[in-house]
Image (spheres, helix red, strand yellow):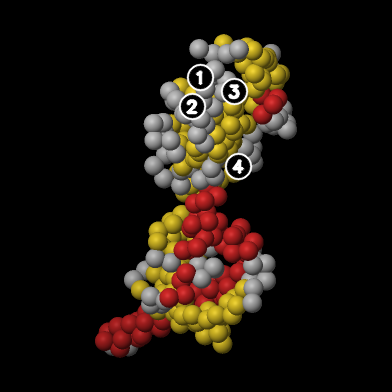
Amino acid sequence: MRPIYLLLLLSLTFITACNEKQSKREKDARAFVQEWNELHTEIKAPFLKTKYMDVVQYYGVERTNFKVEQHKKMIFEDFPNYRQTIKDNEIAVTKEGADYLVVFEKEVQYGDVKAAYKSFLLLTLSNSRFKILSEGVVGKEAHLNIPVFPYNLDKRLAASENRQLFGDFNGDDLSDHAYVESPVLMSVLENEQSKENVICEDGCNSILHFSAKDLSSIKIEDAYKSDLENLKDLNGDGADEIGFWNIKPNSKSLYIFDPTSGALLTSPVYINTKVHKNMKLIDVIKKSGSKKITVTRSAQRNGTWVLEDEIVLLD
């Protein structure tokens, strides 16, 4: 066989192999989108989480994988009859560099509403598996403010995450409120010991804010999940103290703050919730006299976890 014919044969073989590989990738991309679509109909938000990259361009806004899962979960909770289908199963796949753009018309039903709109997913290969880099609609559609889109869900998430606690935190005899600005979670990984490896944007710190202008915000480090308590006036200064629960998988710690100064009235009260279960606020802190409180915390003594009381005198 002449060299030129051999070279031509090898070129044709290479092109055919590339086309077959490309065709298989496109087929896999369609199968991925079909599975993604079915998980919406089966309303399985936790399974959808694995379909997305850690950071996603989601309806025009960059969001974490965790935030996308929250959105999906809220949709399914609001509309347990939610259904979505791909019209006529028509899915167009276009290779864009190393990624694959998938376009289709999505038909949804929720409550008494039926709607259809042209949608897209941008897929990328991660460890030889497809994952979603971007999700959205084609063009600037007016229906992006309907209940199943992120615009409305964002407002509700912000309200739930910034739950307000009311009290008189500056001692002016007027009601004001406090709320927590929680960090944005990038990922939460659990291992077999039920411990969490948490990654947050700009560090896993929470900020305690007050509506009263004369009170400064308080930063709590290594706190990504929390709850607030109004502890009433503990030190006799006329202002309510505030309790901040720093919640972890197997523990929680109560931070007792004087909002007027931002100071801790005692070191955080640690509770080992794996051992000392169902501990409520009344079990952890009690007012035991004028400018005096008793706190109960978990402590390890001789290899055993016990509850210990401490009397704290307040200035």
Look at 50% across and 74% down and name the residue there.
29
Question: Disc 4 designates what residue?
Answer: 191
| Residue type of the residue flagged with mark 4 | Asn
Relative to 133, does residue 302 appear above or below in the rendering?
above
Q: Secondary structure at mark 1?
A: loop
| Number of the front mark, 3 or 2 | 2
Q: Secondary structure at mark 2?
A: loop
Q: Using the rendered view, name the quadrant where residue 35 is placed.
A: bottom right
Distance of mark 3 from mark 4, alpha carbons? 26 Å
Question: Disc 2 designates what residue?
Answer: 171
Distance of mark 1 from mark 3, alpha carbons? 22 Å
Look at 43% across and 60% down and name the residue there.
56
Q: Secondary structure at mark 4?
A: loop
Residue 152: give x, y in percent of width and height.
50, 63
Relative to 212, does residue 140 appear above or below in the rendering?
below
Residue 264: give x, y in percent of width and height.
49, 22
* Sequence-wise first label, 3 or 2: 2
Distance of mark 4 from mark 2, alpha carbons? 46 Å
Distance of mark 1 from mark 4, alpha carbons? 46 Å
Quick check: marks 1 and 2 in contact, CB under 8 Å? Answer: yes
Identify which residue, 176 or 200, lies in the foreground. Answer: 176
Question: Disc 3 designates what residue?
Answer: 269
Residue 31 visible: yes
Distance of mark 3 from mark 2, alpha carbons? 25 Å
Identify which residue, 161 or 308, lies in the foreground. Answer: 161
Question: Disc 1 designates what residue?
Answer: 237
Q: Determine crowd level at label 2: few under 14, some 14-19, many 20+ residues with C-alpha closer than 10 A.
A: some
**Furthest-front residue in this view:** 173
| Residue type of the residue flagged with mark 2 | Gly
